[in-house]
Image (spheres, coloured by chain):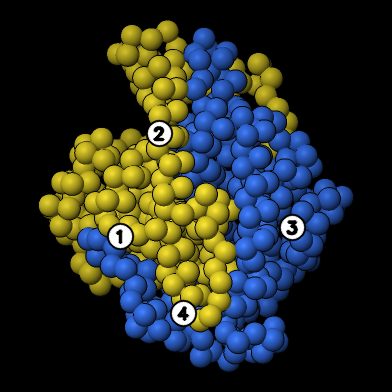
Chain colours: A blue, B yellow
Amino acid sequence: MHNILDHKKMTDFSEKLLQRRTIRKYSSENIDDKLLNELFVMGCRASTTGNMQVYSIVINRDNQMKSQLAPLHFNQKMITEAPVVLTFCADFNRFNKWCILRNAQPGYNNFLSFFTAAIDALLVAQTFCIAAEAKGLGICYLGTTIYTADKIIEVLKLPKGVVPVTTVTLGWPSGKPEQVDRLPLEAVIHKETYKDYSTASIENYYKQKEERADSQQFVLENNKETLAQVFTDIRYKKADNVYFSNTLLHVLKEQGFM
Amino acid sequence: MHNILDHKKMTDFSEKLLQRRTIRKYSSENIDDKLLNELFVMGCRASTTGNMQVYSIVINRDNQMKSQLAPLHFNQKMITEAPVVLTFCADFNRFNKWCILRNAQPGYNNFLSFFTAAIDALLVAQTFCIAAEAKGLGICYLGTTIYTADKIIEVLKLPKGVVPVTTVTLGWPSGKPEQVDRLPLEAVIHKETYKDYSTASIENYYKQKEERADSQQFVLENNKETLAQVFTDIRYKKADNVYFSNTLLHVLKEQGFM
């Protein structure tokens, strides 16, 4: 039997997860190294393929370094305003070096190994973030890391075998933003096999999102007919996606993963 | 100022994260749908790119389905022994269908979009796992999903635009395994820029791991000279990595992401 007391103790945490929101504005208060280290220890308890730990984390606190990173994240203010910026990297470099030193021939210069290392890095990133939020800190993920990985590699001096996969800004929250919407659970869960979506189910699942005042405002502001067009024509455009796909595939090749 | 009381309440959770271990043996007790749903709601509170939620989760409880999945996970017993098996998928299919229905032209048939969706799926997976562990459940990640994605796609009937990225087995723990080792924190953390590893630092960081009795036993059992050789020659071999890289790249193409 599982421990009921234990179960009860965790209710606070469950409530916290349900109430979570991304934090983009931070107070001027710093984060001390001791707390940051504790969070890293927890983060590194995340599952990792074969206990290889094929990831690295680069910490940026220095203003000059953050200023160099800012344009690579399209000048999103969180980069310069957050006391701590973390770049989570897929990293086979350390493991390869260990293998060579131990008379073992590493065979990790391929796409599978990159993706394995990326999974490792992302599980650590998310464990770190949840641990940080449990301590009252706020986080924001930046998807831009994989768009400009080539330039981030230069700034952070990442060697072959290392690819940045995501960036997290971290700080004490300044204010409590509205919690954003999510699709109904049924929209993302499939039982036993994938049930493909009918027109009726898409209508049903996206109805609430489309009817929100902020969504409608978004459509108006952007001079579009539908919310979906705001995504396809403005936020995540085909031309950009194709351009950044080529950059990212080139990075994988340059870093020795293709 | 951050809330000190709140900070204190979360100590139990921090302790739990520090004490976590992967669970590969489960009791026969089932997991009720209500609890599973709660965990999914928490999981879906994870950060997601542009709030697109480009992921899906396939739940398998059915024994016949689990038997079909088992060989695709190299017959690891957790698949058939866990009451619940979850396959987390990168999914642009639902979003694309919504775009088309709303007179918007989706431009997500490329590598960047796949990787964006994979990040989404992995952040949800890890949030789900941490929420589950906080409730006393045990989890195990299976890295095999990306090795045999082509066959998992057939069994789970995943349409174009959907790629399985990881699998998690879930159940109430039967026993408490030893906690596995981790590299010292300094081994994975870099301040401001990446400091590449010297021979001395590799020696230093891997010393503890190599000196463990279980590591030495592992080397003996496998008839190898070094622990690193167990990885390169037996557990994660070059020939396998190259073979599965080709399969995975082929899957990305077939599912419309290249």
Q: Nearer the viewer, mark 3 or mark 2?
A: 2
Write down the residue under mark 1: B58
Do discs 3 and 2 share a chain?
no
Do discs 1 and 4 share a chain?
yes
C-alpha gap between disc 3 and disc 2: 33 Å
For the N terminus of chain A, give its image quadrant.
bottom left
> Looking at the picture, how far across and down is residue A68, in whole percent?
83, 50
Q: Secondary structure at mark 1?
A: strand
Q: Nearer the viewer, mark 2 or mark 4?
A: 4
Amino acid tagged 4? Leu
Amino acid tagged 2? Phe
Tell me the subunit letter for badge 1. B
C-alpha gap between disc 4 and disc 3: 32 Å
Q: Nearer the viewer, mark 2 or mark 1?
A: 2
From the viewer's perspective, is residue B237 above or below residue A126? above
Write down the residue under mark 2: B244
Tell me the subunit letter for badge 4. B
Amino acid tagged 1? Val
Which residue: 51% across, 27% down?
A108
C-alpha gap between disc 2 and disc 1: 22 Å
Q: Nearer the viewer, mark 1 or mark 4?
A: 4
Which residue: 27% across, 57% down?
B157
Do discs 3 and 1 share a chain?
no
Give the label on residue A73, or none.
3
Tell me the subunit letter for badge 2. B
